[in-house]
Amino acid sequence: MKPKHFGRLVLFLLLFTMVLSQFFYNCVVAEAQTITLTVSHVLGTTHPYQPGFEKMAEIVEARTNGEIKFKIFHSASLAEEEEAIEALQMGTIDITTVSAAPLTGFVKEYMACDFPFMFSSPQEAFNFYDGEIGDILLEKTTPIGLIGLCWWENGFRNLTNSIRPIISPEDMKGLKIRTMNSPVHMASVRALGASAVPIAFGELYSALQQGVVDGQENPVANIHAMRFYEVQKYLTLTRHFHDPSPTFISAKTWNKLSEEQRKIIKEASIEARDYMRQLGIDQEDSLIEDLKKNGMEVIDLTPEQLDAFKEATKNVWKDFEDKIGKDFLDKFLNALP
Ligand code: EAX
């Protein structure tokens, strides 16, 4: 080979090696800078929680130019709600959305969210939790290691059972009704004449299937997503509890993020909130029709029939004034619509 050709070959190989090493360096650095946030929730993929987190992930990844990605675990595959709260405290899970009930063991003021018959429409509930009271409650979780992003939505809870159609509180007598581990929910179910049996959400289907409990209460989206229609005959649209689902990020995670990344995550959680709330509202009627197609007898109460349930539970809140704290409870009740 002539010397000048050899020289050109060496130069080419040198340049090629430099380009290749720069490429691999960029890949390694880029990978090293990519943050993957672990997200946990307990509902199935057809429930608004899942598309809500997918929407949030899409926004965050786009606005951080791929720096932050989500890995979403649904159907309690990673943790039940209380476990997810503890995991956020430890920083082993980064983000979750949970009902108010599992928070009551960590921050007592969340018990107020579980009182029966507080709201008559989704918008009333949204206005309430997106206002001062919602901000106060989210602030109260900071000391336990959870940063409150905003209030997502689980929906209005309804009664199902496999024994009889429930038209009045009389029909509740003798029934074993599964509740969340919520002292207020349990007291309300007992005030209606049934016995309240707290069971973890992930174990509820088999508990219903085996007859450990006769019934349960959940929003229509949850009843449908978890296929409870396979093990429950009757659905009464009581909408007795409204169930908000505050969304949190671990303080340990939050503290590692830049101001810009925090801003993006907060804004994305709010945009995803509005998206998933609307999804829940839009799908409710069609889900009820699908529950009927799957064999459920759906009872829609008259206003007079519903009044009997309201009357039976109207004093539940009094048993919790001391537990929650009178000052906060007065503020909470005075802010209701
Ligand atoms: O928060 O446990 C329940 O019945 C809740 O609706 C569910 O965990 C979603």
Image (cartoon, rainbow, N blue to C red):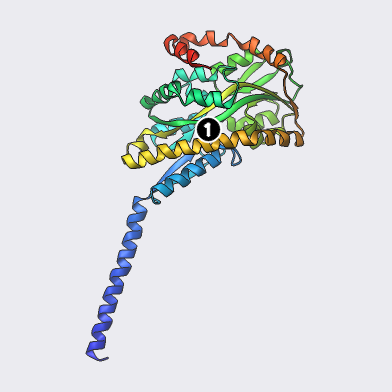
| Residue nearest the viewer, comparing 72 with 213 | 72
Residue 178 position within the rendered picture, expressed as x and y whole percent measured from the top left: 63, 23
Q: Quadrant of residue 237?
A: top right
What residue sits 33% from the left and 60% below the top?
26
| Residue nearest the viewer, comparing 126 with 67 | 126
Residue 87 position within the rendered picture, expressed as x and y whole percent measured from the top left: 43, 34
**Which residue in the structure is indicated by mark 1?**
80
Q: Would you say the beta carbon of the disc 1 residue lies within 8 angstroms of ligand 1?
A: yes
Q: What is the crowding at mark 1: few (fewer than 14 residues within 10 Å), some, or many (at least 20)?
A: many
Left or right: residue 16 versus residue 51 is: left
What residue sits 40% from the left and 47% below the top?
63
Q: Residue furthest bottom?
A: 2
Residue 198 position within the rendered picture, expressed as x and y whole percent measured from the top left: 59, 22
What residue sits 49% from the left and 39% below the top?
272
What residue sits 43% from the left and 45% below the top?
60
Instruction: Give the number of marks.
Output: 1
Residue 201 position within the rendered picture, expressed as x and y whole percent measured from the top left: 58, 30
Q: Amino acid at mark 1?
A: Glu
Q: Quadrant of residue 172?
A: top right
Left or right: residue 314 versus residue 2 is: right
